[in-house]
Amino acid sequence: MPEAAPLLLQHLNGMYAMQVLAVGDRSGALAALLDGPGDAVAIAARAGLDERNVEQWLRCMHAAGYAIHDAGVFRAAPEATATFDDDFPIDARGILDFVFAIAGEGVRRIPEAMRTGAGVEPRVFAELGAAASRINSRLYAAALVNEWIARDSALVERLEAGAGIADIACGDGDATVRLARAFPRSTVIGIDPSARPRTDAPNLTLIAETAEHLGAQGAFALVTCLDALHHLGDPAAVVRQMADALEGDGVLLIAETSMTGDVDRDLAADPFVLSTHAAGLFYCMQDNLAAGGDGTTTSRGLDWVTTALSEAGLGTVDVFDSDTGFRVFLARR
């Protein structure tokens, strides 16, 4: 046998490890293990699950390194405890939601999508979209207001006094809620075809529309599009619509995963770049193509964002890379 297993088998192990975690999270077995040590009988009882299934799952968790076994008793490994703690930088359970969802209809549609280039309709990705929102939630909590918007002190003062804020392609509205709570004197709307009403904040309204309807909602001091512009069929047109809705010296804020577009440079800079490329293939790019786009993703770099901002007449652009992994564009006319 070679010293190192073939790459295929290494990745097979990783795939199984993620799936074992995902079903453990959905079934309640993971929470029961994290609650404390126990044998299969105790952990199954704690979770309300079948003992034999839990025993097999615990063996998988031990083999994957997420559980430690001693004389029939299993306990969560320290890394597992840290990963699923509330203080972990991202919501790890959101990643498991993504793993669970990506095993569904969406991936089974990709081979045909690769043949036709027509993309896959957004309804197929509803569960993936919700998982992606959950993954990003803690990043937005840490950086959206206190880092990205705080970079522009004049904007902060304006929003604190009360102004209009719009969040484009807001998905489930999690980030939009954060904006509404951070600036309670401002009026905040979120626009997305799949938007559903939320009552998290009295100054918040979610509208089930596309960005082309933004102008009918008034003028805004801040318009945001967070990790979503690359999903849209014509990002340049959306940027123009966002720019047209700015009030006076309003600010357009776009956040996209920081990539150069150079496949080797990006791999050298980020050992987890496969996740970004794969999410593009299995989700983001298919959304873009289904909406009539050219398949733009962050894997190609972000020059297309800079070009769209320039073409929309936004000549003053502050661009910076956040520790969250996003490149942020703050643009004015």
Image: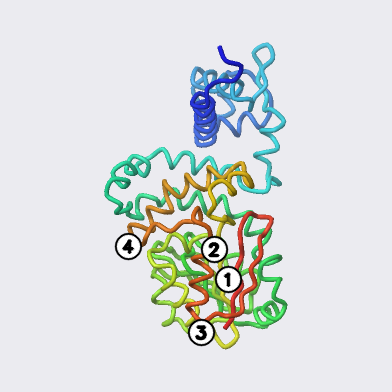
The amino acid type found where label 1 is placed reads Leu
Disc 3 secondary structure class: loop
Apparent side of residue 294 relative to residue 175 in the rendered image (left or right): left
* Residue carrying label 4: 292
Q: Mark 1 packing: few (<14 Cα in 10 Å), some, or many (20+)?
A: many
Disc 4 secondary structure class: loop
Q: Nearer the viewer, mark 2 or mark 4?
A: 4
Query: Which of pointers 2 and 4 lies earlier in the amino acid sequence?
Result: 2
Q: How far apart are marks 3 and 4 (CA)?
A: 28 Å
Query: Which of pointers 1 and 2 lies earlier in the amino acid sequence?
Result: 2
| Image marks 3 and 2: residues in contact by CB distance under 8 Å | no
The answer to which image quadrant residue 194 occupies is bottom left
Q: How far apart are marks 4 and 1 (CA)?
A: 24 Å
> What is the number of the mark on residue 226?
2
> What is the number of the mark on residue 219?
3
Q: Mark 2 packing: few (<14 Cα in 10 Å), some, or many (20+)?
A: many
| Image marks 2 and 4: residues in contact by CB distance under 8 Å | no
Apparent side of residue 32 relative to residue 82 in the rendered image (left or right): left
Residue 317 x, y percent position in the rendering: 61, 75
> What is the number of the mark on residue 285?
none
* Residue carrying label 1: 253
The amino acid type found where label 2 is placed reads Leu
- Quarter of the figure with the C terminus: bottom right
The answer to which image quadrant residue 233 occupies is bottom left
Query: Which of pointers 4 and 1 lies earlier in the amino acid sequence?
Result: 1
Identify the residue shown where x is 64% and y is 25%: 65
Q: Mark 4 packing: few (<14 Cα in 10 Å), some, or many (20+)?
A: some
